[in-house]
Amino acid sequence: MISATGAYISIKNLSKRHGNLEVLRNINLEVTPGELTVLIGPSGCGKSTLLRCLNGLETLDSGTIVINGVVLEKNKNSSHSQSDFDKKARAIRENVGMVFQNFNLFPHLTLLENITKAPIVVKKMTQKEAKEKAKDLLAKVGLSTHADHYPCQLSGGQQQRAAIARALAMSPKAILYDEPTSALDPGLVHEVLQVMRTLDNEGMTQIVVTHEMRFARDVADHIVHMQDGKIVEIGTPEQIFTSPSDDRTRHFLRNFN
């Protein structure tokens, strides 16, 4: 289900506090199917918290998130209970994968076992079906020969590609990435970004928090610049990198020229 505006992900008036700190302030954003949206901004500006809200890992203080027709809302003035929020968050996570900064692979499982676990437990897929799909996904991310390896036997880039394969195993309609290359050595960044480029070419809806400005400029459909919990500016890569309308965006990008 797509919203009346054509958005697969729609965020309206989202705010979030951690104690006295207002981490997100009245966020409004829409992402259409097949779009690759990149979130940029200084550390601590709320980018990761926004992703966690989208995946139901954080409750909302105000506002709404609509993903694939599922409405996520939980605030002190609403009638939505925590159990209702949790139920809807689980429904969202069935269609929205998330790739974390530090891979989060199960260290005691092989890559094949890491990738088959959720489809078998959550989607009730047979072991045979799950293994066949996992092998296809490992081939997709260039890890066909590593199915029986444990995470500790892999480079950081290989672990992150495996994490993407694990997210894809749930057949998501969208994937969220929280700084997927920040824990990698510079030489390993390209192999992870290349997988994301391939998924973009295949029409996967993706939201990426990253400091890789070249990737943002070359691949993104839209770039969202955040500072102090707010969206400062949204535009195409050309608009953001050549003629930003906000001085804060211009100043932020100077650090990457």
Image: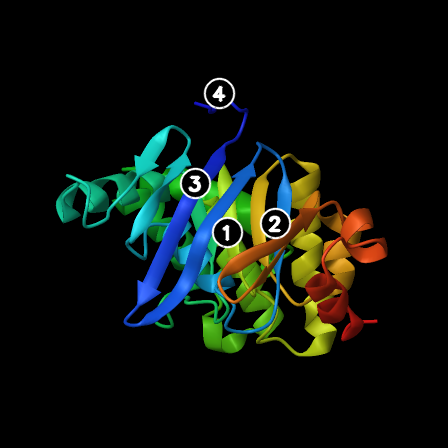
What amino acid does circle 1 point to? Leu
Contact (Cβ within 8 Å) of mark 4 with mark 1? no
Q: Which mark is residue 4?
A: 4
Question: How far apart are labels 1 and 2 at the CA level?
Answer: 21 Å
Q: Tell me residue 94's x, y (percent).
A: 35, 40
Query: In terms of sequence position, does the residue under pointer 4 or pointer 1 come before the other?
Result: 4
Q: Is residue 14 visible?
A: yes
Residue located beneath label 3 in the image: 12
Left/right placement of residue 59 relative to residue 81 reads: right
What amino acid does circle 4 point to? Ala
Query: In terms of sequence position, does the residue under pointer 1 or pointer 3 come before the other?
Result: 3
Numbered disc 1: secondary structure = strand
Quadrant in which the N terminus is drawn: top left
Question: How far apart are labels 4 and 1 at the CA level?
Answer: 23 Å
Residue located beneath label 1 in the image: 176
Front-lying residue, 29 or 33: 29
Query: In terms of sequence position, does the residue under pointer 3 or pointer 2 come before the other?
Result: 3
Front-lying residue, 126 or 238: 238
- Depth check, mark 4 against mark 1: the one in front is 4
Residue located beneath label 2 in the image: 139
